Amino acid sequence: MPPDSGLPHVRPARSRREFLQRAGGGFGALAFSYLLGLDGLGTPAGAAAAAPPTNPLAPRPPRFPARAKSVIWLFMEGGPSHVDLFDPKPELDRVAGQPLPASFGRPITSMGTGRNALMPSRRKWERHGESGLWVSDWYPQVAQHADDLCVIRSCWADGLNHVGSVCQMNTGDILAGRPALGAWTTYGLGSENSNLPAFVILTDASEVLGGPKNWSSGFLPAGYQGTAFRNDRTPIYHLAPPPGVGPEQQRGKLDLLANLNRQFNAAHPDDTELAARLNSYELAYRMQAAAPEAVDLAGETPATKKLYGLEEPQTEKFGANCLLARRLVERGVRFVQCYSGSGSGWDAHTDLEGNHSKYCRQTDQPIAGLLTDLKARGLLDTTLVIWGGEFGRTPFNEKGTGRDHNPWGFSVWMAGGGVRAGTVVGATDELGLRAVHEPVHVHDLHATILHLMGLDHERLTYLHNGRQERPTINSGNPVWSALA
């Protein structure tokens, strides 16, 4: 039609082929948008700014059916000797007093290069339960639960010293700055209790080496970090209001503070520290009633207190923490860590016999009591219990009566929560120095724990500095042979 006709211009009809050529690109964009959504990347740029701060601890469904709802990690800080507890080595006893064979190389340890003589185990070993699991006489009561344990004898890690190794066992890296596994779990699943933290730390002695970086949220929003508890009437410092401040006055102060903070947050939507602070104030207010009740062991029966060893001075402290861990998971706390020997108490460079006798005596009955109690309450099936340290000990002696650090091969066991009970996974060499069969790196261990919680370690990601970070960094696979 001539352009000067005065009639509206009508575009000629498009062919079906041209229509598909022009519109087909949109199908790819739709698919790409869907994939971004699966990875949590498809949120519109303005959505975070428009939305008010939400509760980071709100419960979220797992990616697939979970075998465990909660974790109790019994952390033996300092490095328990696997060749004296769960990994018997008859060959080590046979060649005791000789130097490490040249075929093993010369491992560089925290205190030297492995030139010292091989040191035998003085333990008596027996098979226990229907599974015939080997446990030494240092853990006679834990041995009664042999058929509940899955002992991974082939763990290995990257660090030589305590600070880096404790950090890696918690965060996956020997360097500080990454989120703890408990923080990742909370990020993925939230909490089932709005009145208590989702991630709780319990210690028995001094400060854990490396301190709060071991339960830090790292680059995740601050609301996912762990909370250190004390097992007395004031589980968290400064939780109770000052004398003379009643509930109405305190509620009014919190409401005013929250209103001011939200106004600031609206102008600074990317400030996760402030958003976490808003939620922490509210959580602290609710915890003033919930936390003292959760840590009050007075209502437990005398039989329960005896089961955990609360009547004995040697087992009272760790036993109370194990009992408290059970009470916390009952109340929906997602991840609890109980440290034994916090401050690297298990670090037996000298007097292995005295050191491990002390710490095994402190932990044997409480751990056995915890497993018994969880099973009796029907909680063991949904609670994953983990035992282990940041590394093991060498087969050669250190200073004549102790053992050096050994990150190349050591034991960790798990119970409950979907593990294959009464089994052994992997193996170290005939002297217990290195993992040689089914090696399980810390990242593999973390991937396994997350899998049992219903989370895929490769898809649990967080965008940080332009990179999709995940709990296991660049490696790790679930240990399928450890799963029921």
Image (tube, rainbow, N blue to C red):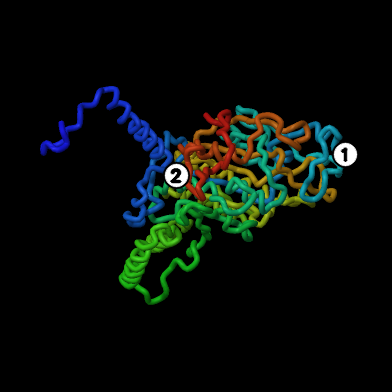
Tag 1–tag 2 contact (CB < 8 Å): no
Whether 137 is drawn above or below 253: the answer is above
Asked if residue 44 can be seen in this view, the reply is yes
**Where does the image place residue 392, in percent across and percent down from the top left?**
70, 43
Q: Give, as a three-letter code, the residue at label 2.
A: Gly
Q: How many labels does the image show?
A: 2
The quadrant where residue 1 appears: top left
Q: Residues within 10 Å of mark 2 (few under 14, many from 20)?
A: many
> Would you say 282 lies left or right of 422 here?
left
Q: Residues within 10 Å of mark 1 (few under 14, many from 20)?
A: some
- Residue positioned most to the right: 98
In which image quadrant can residue 120 be found? top right
Q: What element carries label 1?
A: loop
Question: Hey, which quadrant is residue 206 in on the image?
Answer: bottom right
Disc 1 target residue? 99
Q: Distance between the residues labelled 1 and 2?
A: 49 Å
Nearer to the camera, 263 or 135:
263
Query: In this picture, is 469 found above or below 55?
Result: above
Residue at the far bottom: name it: 244
Residue 84: where, in percent of width, then height? 73, 40
Label 2 belongs to which residue?
188
Question: In this orientation, which residue lies closer to the viewer: 461 or 95?
Answer: 461
- Horizontal and vertical percent position of residue 427: 69, 31
The residue at 56%/49% (across/down) is 308
Q: Earlier in the sequence, mark 1 or mark 2?
A: 1
Residue 401's spot in the image, x, y percent?
82, 48
Q: Identify the amino acid type marked 1.
A: Pro
Q: Circle 2 sits in a helix, a strand or a loop, which is it?
A: helix
- Residue pictured at 81% horizontal, 42% vertical: 396
